[in-house]
Every structure is written in C-alpha cells, then in structure tokens.
Image (cartoon, grey):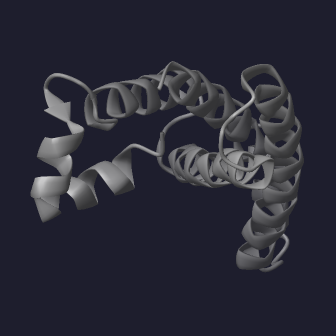
Amino acid sequence: MKLSIITCVLVGLAGTRHLSAKKLEFYRESSSGYNINAYYFAVNVTSTVEMVIQMIIAGFFAAFISMPISSWVNFILNFVVLGFGCLSWSLLLSIVIDEKNLVMVTGFLLAVTNIFLGGGLPPIEFPFIYARPFVKLLAGLLAPG
C-alpha cells in the first residue's frame, strides 16, 4: 500500500509537467488557428507512452526486489494500470488548476485519496468498500492506488 501511494504521487507529479510546461506553446498553437484537440491528443499519447515505459521499468525492479507469488507480467501490469490512473488525474488537474498551485494540489489530492480511500486504513477499510457500491465506485475513481 505504501508503494502504491508513493508511486501514485510521483507519477502524478511527473505527469503534471507535460501540460504545465507547454502552456505557452499551447497558447501559441491555439492563437494560430490550429486544432487544440489534436494538441491535447498528442500530449496524451506521448505522456502515456512515456509513463508505460517508466512503469514497466519500475514494476520490473519492484518485482525483482519483492519476488511476488503471482506472475511477473501481472505484477508489472498492475504498475502500468496504476500509472494510467495517476497520469489521467495529473493531466486533468493540469488543465483545471493554476500552474502555481498545481504541484501542491496534485500531490495532496493523490496522497489523501489513496490514503483514505485505498482500503488499508481504519476510516475506510476493504470490507467497508466492497459492501457498499457507491463507496466502491468512489474509491475506484478517486484513488488509483
């Protein structure tokens, strides 16, 4: 659980730079009349490919260190899916939140939601999550870890 929280926050913070560092470029492209949806699509694809490569490498090293009882492919795929959830939150927050507060809001949101909705701590534990469909949906959407 600790590894997923740390990984989630680090991937989320790394994902914020994809859009926040290129805001000036985005404004230039949009004022020139280019399609902004194509720009966002290109940023999404390139950041997703970069994240998948990073998560495969991180998952490989984590599997090598912990020697899981499941297959290594499933273990590494779990890292990739975790990365998808974190990257999607960071890309959304990069659009919605101001650049000055982006790192703080992204880190705080991902850390708090993964701690409290992750199922490992007493406020909301796994039996409570699985017994209530709304809490299960909320935990699945807000806490990638």
Place of residue 145 in the rendered image (x, y in percent of width and height, measured from the top left)? 48, 39
Query: Which residue is nearer to you in this view: 108 or 62?
Result: 62
Residue at 80 percent across and 69 percent down: it is: 39
| Apparent side of residue 70 relative to residue 32 in the rendered image (left or right) | left
Residue at 47 percent across and 46 percent down: it is: 144
Query: Which residue is nearer to you in this view: 135 or 106?
Result: 135
| Apparent side of residue 123 relative to residue 18 in the rendered image (left or right) | left
Tell me if I can see residue 31 in this picture.
no
Residue at 15 percent across and 64 percent down: it is: 133
Place of residue 135 in the rendered image (x, y in percent of width and height, measured from the top left)? 16, 53
| Apparent side of residue 94 relative to residue 63 in the rendered image (left or right) | left
Which residue ends up furthest to the front in the rendered image?
A: 69
How many marks on residues? 0
* Vertical order, 42 against 18 (above or below): below
Place of residue 114 in the rendered image (x, y in percent of width and height, measured from the top left)? 39, 32
Quadrant of the rendered structure where residue 62 is?
top right
* Vertical order, 11 against 35 (above or below): above
Tell me if I can see residue 71 in this picture.
yes
* Vertical order, 18 against 42 (above or below): above
Residue at 85 percent across and 36 percent down: it is: 60
Quadrant of the rendered structure where residue 30 is?
bottom right
Quadrant of the rendered structure where residue 13 is?
top right
Place of residue 113 in the rendered image (x, y in percent of width and height, measured from the top left)? 34, 34
* Vertical order, 107 against 54 (above or below): above
